[in-house]
Amino acid sequence: EPEVTQTPSHQVTQMGQEVILRCVPISNHLYFYWYRQILGQKVEFLVSFYNNEISEKSEIFDDQFSVERPDGSNFTLKIRSTKLEDSAMYFCASTTKLGPNQPQHFGDGTRLSIL
Amino acid sequence: RKEVEQDPGPFNVPEGATVAFNCTYSNSASQSFFWYRQDCRKEPKLLMSVYSSGNEDGRFTAQLNRASQYISLLIRDSKLSDSATYLCVVFRFSGNTPLVFGKGTRLSVIA
């Protein structure tokens, strides 16, 4: 079964540094998402992406964050000037089309630790 | 009021027991509903979609009551491998947060 893959599995970074989290969505999927989950808390939506632009973004997704699809297969999340509170699991997800009953398939996540 | 609320548990049940989880959602514009399963420090994995008529997949039965804005998941003949956190997830087209997760209900099935 096709999978969403994410790299790295664990990223440790000094506060203030920039990080790039990478995702390869399922090949025929068109809609892409980033979520985060702070330890012990619920999964939170960050941003959705379709047709090379952001569709929706939550209040969490401020100017510190950006996404892009540089080469038609990778989907990246960049976090500039990282803060301690950015430490979390970051999940990428994709779906083939937008609509009711179109579940999203999640990658196995990147654990981001800010020191 | 949280948009998706679940009893956090934990539910500790013996193997073979039947266990039910409840979830309520506050936004009546919500259009689709799912149960995901999440193992410790792993990604959410789709367990099943929830349809208005109710649906069943093996030992799992999901029900939706739109009038009460209530979703349930029933697990019959629980197995050790069912131990996980069960996430109630709500989708809506509009708004800036299309997919909203509950915090999850922790289940431990004990031998």
Image: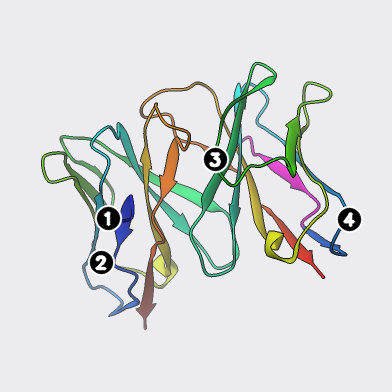
Q: Is residue A51 visible?
A: yes
Distance, label 2 to label 3, CA atoms, is 39 Å
Identify the residue under disc 1: B59
Q: Which residue is depicted at the point 63% across and 48% down?
A: A91
Q: Looking at the image, tell me whether mark 3 or mark 4 is earlier in sequence order.
A: 4
Distance, label 1 to label 4, CA atoms, is 48 Å
Please tell me whether mark 4 or mark 2 is closer to you in this view: 4
Q: Secondary structure at mark 4?
A: loop
Marker disc for residue A17: 4
Identify the residue under disc 2: B77
Along the viewing direction, whichever of A6 and B57 lies nearer the viewer: A6
Tell me the chain of label 2.
B
The amino acid type of the residue labelled 4 equals Gln
Image quadrant containing the N terminus of chain A? top right
Q: Is residue A108 visible?
A: no
- Residue extending furthest toward the front: A63
Q: Looking at the image, tell me whether mark 2 or mark 1 is earlier in sequence order.
A: 1
In x, y percent, where is residue B14?
A: 29, 80
Task: Judge left or right: residue A73 versus residue B83.
Answer: right
Tell me the chain of label 1.
B
Distance, label 4 to label 2, CA atoms, is 49 Å
> Label 1: how many residues lie within 10 Å, few (<14), some (14-19) or many (20+)?
few
The amino acid type of the residue labelled 2 equals Asp
Distance, label 3 to label 4, CA atoms, is 23 Å
Say above or below: B23 vs A114: above
Identify the residue under disc 3: A58
